[in-house]
Amino acid sequence: MEEGEEEMSRLVPPHGGELRPLLLKGEELKEARKKARFLPVVRITSRERDDLIMMGIGAFSPLEGFMGKADWRGVCQDMKTAKGVFWPIPITLSVTKEEAAGLKEGQEVTLVDGEADEVMGCMVIQERYMINKNYECKQVFRTMQTSWSQQSHGLGQRESRWPCESGQRRRVSPKV
């Protein structure tokens, strides 16, 4: 073993088996910054922004983007993604009905922090679907009393944001 390899071999493997940071660097980041200016904008909540940052640094490995419907359903039902990886809370990107009407699968969009008005990344919409917020709340938080879960997990922000967009296999570039 070479120097450093022994120490690396003693590290705990990433959740799901592979670390998948999605941050862009170098020339790829420069190109994304240019492209982001001309793409349709999707404004994201602070919870979605934080989820995006966690994906960017690899903390949500093995996720490659916001969850699609199969992952959302699996996490709500069994705390497992469609591939069987343990995941306790859905990681989704919600938009309003009006926003959803203008978006389509295969379309690339720029993700903008709704509070700071900063570009946070880009993604290709892979799937559009509707979530059942009451079902999610009951399954994930084991209650229909949303007062505590709205504060802790941003469910109040989702009140008018319920159609979901899934953006697997996209790379993010905070502050593009």
Image (cartoon, helix red, strand yellow):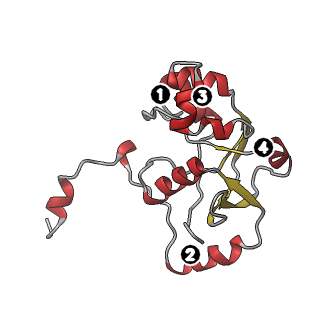
* Amino acid type at image mark 1: Met
Q: CA distance from mark 3 to mark 4?
A: 20 Å
Q: Position of residue 137 (x, y in %)?
A: 58, 25
- Counting residues from the start of the chain, the first of labels 2 and 3 encountered is 2
Disc 1 element:
loop
Q: Residues within 10 Å of mark 4 (few under 14, many from 20)?
A: some
* Amino acid type at image mark 2: Leu
Q: CA distance from mark 1 to mark 2?
A: 34 Å
Q: Nearer the viewer, residue 150 or 107?
A: 150
| Residue receiving disc 2 | 29
* Amino acid type at image mark 3: Arg
Residue 79 - label: 1
Disc 4 element:
loop
Disc 3 element:
helix
Tell me which residue sits at (46%, 32%) in the image: 88
Q: Quadrant of the N terminus?
A: bottom left
Disc 2 element:
helix
- Counting residues from the start of the chain, the first of labels 3 and 1 encountered is 3
Tell me which residue sits at (65%, 35%) in the image: 69
Q: Nearer the viewer, residue 27 or 89?
A: 89
Q: Nearer the viewer, residue 112 or 4?
A: 112
Q: Position of residue 4 (x, y in %)?
A: 17, 67
Q: CA distance from mark 4 to mark 1?
A: 26 Å
Count of labels shown? 4
Q: Residues within 10 Å of mark 1 (few under 14, many from 20)?
A: many
| Residue receiving disc 4 | 96
